[in-house]
Amino acid sequence: MIAAASNRRRSQFLESALFWAFRIGTYFVLLCATYIFLDIGIKGGRTVFTRTAPFVNLKFLSEPPQTLYVFDYQGKKMELSDREFRAWKTTHKEDVDVTSVSYSAGGIWPCIVGTALLVIGSMTLALFIGISCAIYLSEYSRDGRFIRLIRVAILNLAGVPSIVFGLFGFGLFVIFFGWNVSLLSGWFTLGLMVLPAIITASEESLRAVPQGLREGSLALGATKWQTIRKNVLPYALPGILTSSILGIARVAGETAPIMFTAAYAMRDEMPWQVSHWTNFFFQGVMALPYHIYVVSSKIPQNEYTERVQYGTAFVFLAVVMLIALTSILLRERQRRRLSW
């Protein structure tokens, strides 16, 4: 009896210790995440928002990145962008001691556009291919050794590092297919990277639809495809949209794959400024995560680069949240419209 009571007290103590360890660990992770987001929100908000009307730094959100020129003129500290400095030099012929800081003036408008194009294009490809694969695996294939091998391969691909997908895309799309560093190369590389997660989540969503909906449709004379299209896919769509939310978050935040396949450190023209519409797909773009990487690691750090880093990170989080929120709203609307 004494030994049993002692073992029970020891077990209760261990359980309580593990409970508090997990609880403290969870709160610590949440606290760290809160600190990071608050740090980005406060410092980035100082760049994105202003104290005067219209209370938004439209210059930062609507202009391309430029070099910042800092110098003293008649006892006043001047901070001019490249365009402003050139205009200033036309009216002031004096020689001044100028310090230039790359990417620290202007704005990030091309980066916002490039990120949105990469996310929309890659997710369109990934959802089309992923849902098609999920429909085949869930509705048409027979459970055999080959199909089980395919599922294992898909799960293994989900754990492949993004840098490997970047090198794969560089070798296949950029070099072998000759697409060079372009939107098309980035779309296919990013689409393939999130494809395993979308296939797995979509297949689980399709399998979650009750079998009775299929049997009732087939009993009324519908074909296999009509049953899938009208009785299975609509009810599985909320789960598929959930996978798209996860895919958007990963695609938008990746730097390594687009570094090899789609992103430029600097590009003056906007994506639609092309001589022919087909050239739109075969051009590189600027992107927010790659811009943050360049500004944070490839140029000397100072107060001006920090302002751009936090401002870009703030806008980047806002863009990702906006796209993900759109998917969440579509999912909730679909759930309210269709339920079983």
Image (cartoon, rainbow, N blue to C red):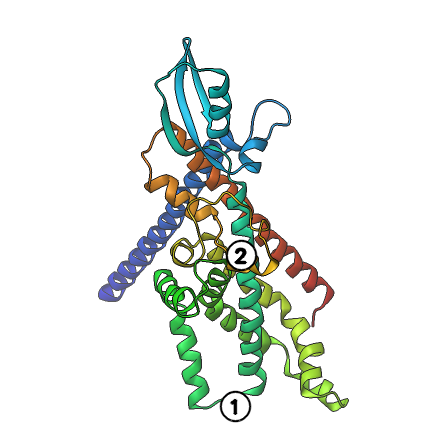
Report x, y in % for residue 286. Answer: 48, 48
Q: Residue at x 58, y 70 (%)?
A: 128
* Quarter the N terminus occupies: bottom left
Q: Is residue 15 left or right of residue 155?
A: left
Nearer-N-terminus badge (2/1): 2
Q: Which of 97 and 222 is in front in this view?
A: 97
Residue at image x 58%, y 79%? 135
Is 89 above or below relative to 220?
above
Could you tell me residue 146's position as x and y percent?
43, 88
Q: What element carries label 2?
A: helix
Residue lying farthest top?
Answer: 74
Q: What residue type is labelled 1?
A: Arg
Q: Which residue is disc 2 drawn over?
A: 119
User: What amino acid is found at the position of numbered circle 2 in the picture?
Assistant: Val
- Residue 142: which disc? 1
Q: Can residue 257 be seen in this view?
A: yes
Q: Which residue is rendered at x = 33% and y = 42% of the image?
A: 297
Closer to the camera in the image, 36 or 32: 36
> Could you say where residue 230 lies in the image, as x and y percent from the top left?
72, 77
How far is disc 2 from disc 1 in space, using C-alphas?
A: 34 Å
Judge by depth and name the residue closer to the eye, 215 or 16: 215
Q: Residues within 10 Å of mark 1 (few under 14, many from 20)?
A: few
Horizontal side of residue 161 vs 54, given as left or right: left
